[in-house]
Amino acid sequence: MLSFLSSLSFFQSAFLWASFFTAVILFLHFFRRKATKRMDISTLRFFSTAAVSQSKAKKLRQLLLLISRLLLIIVLILIFAGLHDKRGPLVALRDPQSTLYSWVDPAVSMEYMENGKTSGQRAEDILGSLVNILPSTVDHYYFDHESGRFLLSREKGAREFAGRFGPSNLEEAVNAFIAASAFAANAQFVMISDFKTSTAALFDSLSERLVETNKNVICVSVTPSKPWNHSVKVSGSSTLKNGVSAVIHADGADLDSSFVELVAGDLRIGQKKIVCVNGDSVQVTFDMPSGVISSGSWGKIELQARDPLPFDNIGYFALTAERGRTVLVVGNAKRNKVIAAALKAAAPDFWTNVSLKEGGELSYEDLNSADLVIVNSFSGQSRILESFISGSGIDRGIIICLDHYQERDFGVDFLQRSGFSMPAAKTIEKGANPVLTDTKSDLWMGFPNISSSKARIYRYRNPVPGTPLVRAGNFPLATFVKNPKLEFVLLSTPIGITDANNLCETGFFVPFVDRLSRFALKGNAQTENIWYAGHIQRNPFFGTERSGALYDKDAKLISAWSAQPFVKVDKPGIYSLTSSTGETSVISVSTHPDETEMKFKRPVIPNERGIYYFEAQELLEQIKNLSNNIWSNWLWVILGVALCAEALLFRK
Amino acid sequence: MNTFSVLRPEHMLPVRNLSLRAKMIVEGTIAGLHKSPFHGFSSEFLEYRPYLNGEPARKIDWRKYAKSDKSVVRLYEDETNMGAHILIDKSASMGFGSSASMTKFDYGRTLAAAFAWILIRQKDAVGLAAFDERIHCYLSPKSTNLQLKNIISHLETAAAQNQTKCGDAINDVAAMIKRRGLCIVISDFFDSPENIARGLRHLRFKRQDILAIAVADPMELDFSGRSDFRLKDLETGQMITIDSQTAAKFFNQGFASHHAELKTISRELEIDFAVVTTAEPFHTSLMRVIEKRRRLF
């Protein structure tokens, strides 16, 4: 009983002051009540039993009338005060003073078509149903995905769903809600999503912050009941030489009797039949007829199949020649010449631009334009280099070589400042051979099978942090250091002209430097070339003092890029990027693979902490029940009964 | 209460000023001075008068009718004193009075004394019977002044108490009456109409001319009030609590119905029935009773 009473609440408790009227009713009743007069009378013969009964009935009627009037007043007060059971998750929405904030997941996966309607449109319909039951005084703010702010909705009912590519902006919406709800007395947050795994994980990470707001959060899932999807993903870089490859994935349903078409430019180049069982992938490769297609052309691979989520059935590509990499070797230029020579010797087409810079000559432009930075035999400090490694290590390949002789060696100092223990200088008089334990690993794949017995390491530093890549004797020659802030390859000995080792004098040196450099580039080698719709990319004109314009394939200007560090293309397709100096390149923008995955997950809802989770149908039923608010119904019934009692019992 | 207080001049003077004596047809032993209203059974023939419709057929002089073919009634002049009985109800219900000054019993015994005084003045023999559930005092009719004193003395000492058995008491008085005469019954008649009718019928059987005077308190005639009542029956001591509206409705209806039945009984038994209220001046009520009786004869 106590829990029941404690669950009751009022939307407008100010109306409870009207309870004073019950006191007025009581006062009037008792004030007007006639005092019983004691009187002797000649005879009671004329007062039959019926008279006494009638009198008693009259008193009872007056009592009932009093009760019905009190009930009438109380019920009216309760109706105006908005009595409700506060335990219901949706009940708070009926509060005339509440404010509703809504976020409909704009992910392209919400375009999933089921029963003739997309998940997104279902979400908008549900939101419309929810908005329709709100009292007219409640303001509804919807999250505008373009401006990243909540905007006041002027219209009732369902809106048109518009999906967008790119990562979820749930965090942005939550931040906006938290900021807005700080000034709203009774703010409610409704989020409707299909809860893809990534979205659910994002929500889980944000749920604690939402709980702290003490506001009602209603999560509504519009996850498809039996999701299936087929997708096309163009793999690798498409070149005239290698042709175009695409991976066709069947998720949730078999793919049979379907075709994949290759279109380059406006020409339909080929078609292949595809059979793929549920959960499997098939790779399709089209050779490019070089006589017809020239480098710089664009194209697409399109899957011809029935699909509830068709946006990912096209993979775009731009035919490009393989781009050369720029290497910047920082340190003693005389000692480092051999490194540049080794790279040029190893792959002149790949390592197209290798430059040597002393530490004091470094500029941001030098570093920004480099794909790989090798720090070797650099004595001294460089704040530019240090901040570059700390801030951009994940984007670029970085190799740091520790020098045994050098005083104030940059590498040793950098390790110390980054929180690593200082490695001690070690010497082996006879020297130690590099040990290649696994030539099939990612690092050594393709490494020539040559002997390393002539290579000798005499001086080195130990211990060094990171995962060993190459060992020499009982110490690591090269390690891979990776933490949230830093990512680089660390060598325990210098690799230029040095008396610490004889690497550059052996046949081991060239492939060693080449493979190590390629390994250092590996983390960013591909992301640089692949554009995903809705995902930010590094502005190719950033730091170049040039600008550019992006056009779609119909030569319509999409956006102008100048000095901003990051840029974004909203939709997949083929775009032309023209720089201010007149150079033009083609960009193929694809759908991010995560967005095509049909993997959903229910978010972890903190129990009874103001966050509620509903399936779509469940919510619609709740809305229906809320429309027929049981409390409201009972109050109106009681009001009707009280009015009837008043009409029946009242006697002038 | 002394004689004077009961028979206060301001009560009796109006009756005299209205020339009661001059208008009365029979005056007992001092016949001729006044015409008494209490006549109708004397032996000395006075004159004929035309028969009026509604009069008892027994009054028609059939011999004259046979001779002249006219319906006439013989009027007699009294030769002897009339024997009158005053029956007064002294039950507890008569003790009711909504105003502090006069209860029904006070009013009734004042009337009784007045009647006795009038009758004695007319040299008529007057007797008294005071009753409640039984007869408490019976004085056989006499026409002396001592009788008047006795009557008044009895009236003074009587107190309103006990339950009413009006019908039985009248019945008992009727059994004691030997000769024809006049009976003045002063009561509130709060007994069952059947009992009352039985008693009155018995009186009629004893050839009594009956004047029934129902004494009522003004509140009994119009029972009303604003407050709820806790009512106590003066006779039985029974108590009820009732709201004013219901009380008024039931009492007024019951009282009116009871009096209607009494009137019906009176009509059937050829009894003069008059209702007087304690708020009414004595001379008014006396005159009303006397005037009514005079019209009838």
Image (spheres, coloured by chain):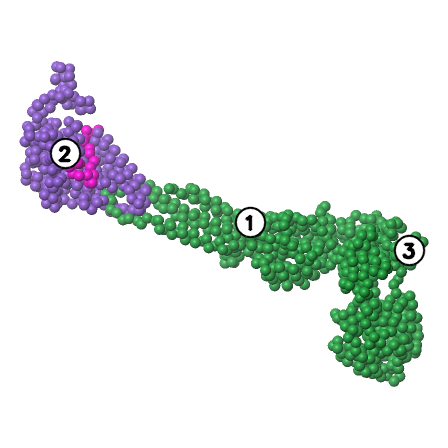
Could you tell me which chain the residue with mark 2 belongs to? B
Q: Nearer the viewer, mark 3 or mark 2?
A: 3
Q: Quadrant of the C terminus of chain A?
A: top left
Report crowding for label 2: few under 14, some 14 to 19, many 20 or more residues within 10 A (C-alpha).
many
Q: Position of residue A216 (x, y in %)?
A: 60, 58
Give the color of chain A as drawn: green
Q: Does the stretch in magenta take in B72?
A: no
- Figure quadrant of residue A543: bottom right
* Residue stretch rendered in magenta on the structure: B268-285
Report crowding for label 3: few under 14, some 14 to 19, many 20 or more residues within 10 A (C-alpha).
some
Q: Which residue is mark 2?
A: B183
Left/right placement of residue A465 relative to residue A604 reads right
Q: Which residue is pictured at 89% across the width and 54% down the height?
A: A286
Q: Which residue is mark 1?
A: A629
Residue A501, compared with residue B18, is above or below; it is below
**From where the camera sits, is residue A599 visible?**
yes
The answer to whether marks 3 and 2 sit on the same chain is no
Q: Position of residue A433 (x, y in %)?
A: 88, 78
